[in-house]
Amino acid sequence: MTGRISVVKTDITTLAVDVIVNAANNSLLGGGGVDGAIHRAAGRELVEECATLGGCETGQAKITGGYRLPARHVIHTVGPVWTGGDRGERELLANCYRSCFQIARQRGLKTIAFPAISCGVYRFPVEQAVETAVRETRAELEANDAIEEVIFACFGDDIYQAYLRALKEP
Ligand code: AR6
């Protein structure tokens, strides 16, 4: 299973995969962090398509084209803001991964790259977020042979190391 999971230190906007995931906000109209980077690299057609989508609820996901990105598509998902863990944050984050995989399955997308959803401005504890990402990805790969590769794109060393640790766990 781990053979289909890669952890790389990279800017997600450089990846030529079927789809990259954006850690967006409920408006889907852009923002800072990875969201800002994806919108800058994709060009203004991306925000124009996003504006037709009517926003997105936390834990859900919506797909657009990739425009000037090397990736063919972008799945925009909205992670939870961490407020201590008693407002369903863990389940909402798991729902983000499930929603993204559901779209990938429906569209036949085989290579998918994730940023560390909610681990920046939304302040989700990194170890717990990474554990959720790995658990949901393993469950998907077990159930879905069609996905060829899942890449965890890490911007910082702390997140990169956290993924390596989580993937060592059975
Ligand atoms: N490639 C890969 N990872 C990146 C990149 C990049 N180019 N840029 C940042 N990261 P964040 P969130 C990492 O804050 O916590 C936005 O304003 C970053 O180091 O982008 O889900 C949205 O509009 C961190 O590990 O997303 C929302 O309002 C991870 O991506 C809000 O931020 C996520 O950090 C969403 O907050």
Image (spheres, grey):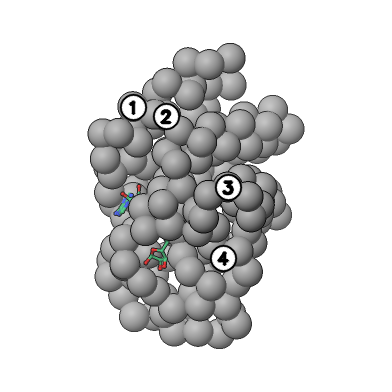
Which of label 4 and label 3 is nearer to you? Answer: 3
Q: Is residue 145 visible?
A: no
Residue at 57% across, 77% down = 55
Which image quadrant is residue 59 in? bottom right
Query: The disc labelled 2 sits on which kind of residue?
Result: Tyr
Q: Secondary structure at mark 3?
A: loop
Locate residue 159, reporting x and y percent.
35, 36
Query: The disc labelled 3 sits on which kind of residue?
Result: Gly
Name the mark on residue 85: 3
* Tag 1 residue: 161
Q: Are marks 4 and 3 in contact (CB under 8 Å)?
A: no
Residue at 42% across, 29% down = 163
Residue at 45% across, 33% down = 127
Residue 146 is left or right of residue 25, and the answer is right
Which of label 2 and label 3 is nearer to you? Answer: 3
Q: The N terminus appears in which quarter of the rendering?
A: top right
Residue 108 is left or right of residue 115, and the answer is right
Which of label 1 and label 3 is nearer to you? Answer: 3
Q: Secondary structure at mark 2?
A: helix
* Tag 2 residue: 163
Q: The C terminus appears in which quarter of the rendering?
A: top right
> What whole-number distance in Å separates the C-alpha atoms at marks 1 and 3?
23 Å
> What whole-number distance in Å separates the C-alpha atoms at marks 2 and 3?
21 Å
Locate residue 145, reporting x and y percent.
67, 32
Which numbered disc, 4 or 1, marks the residue that appears first in the sequence?
4
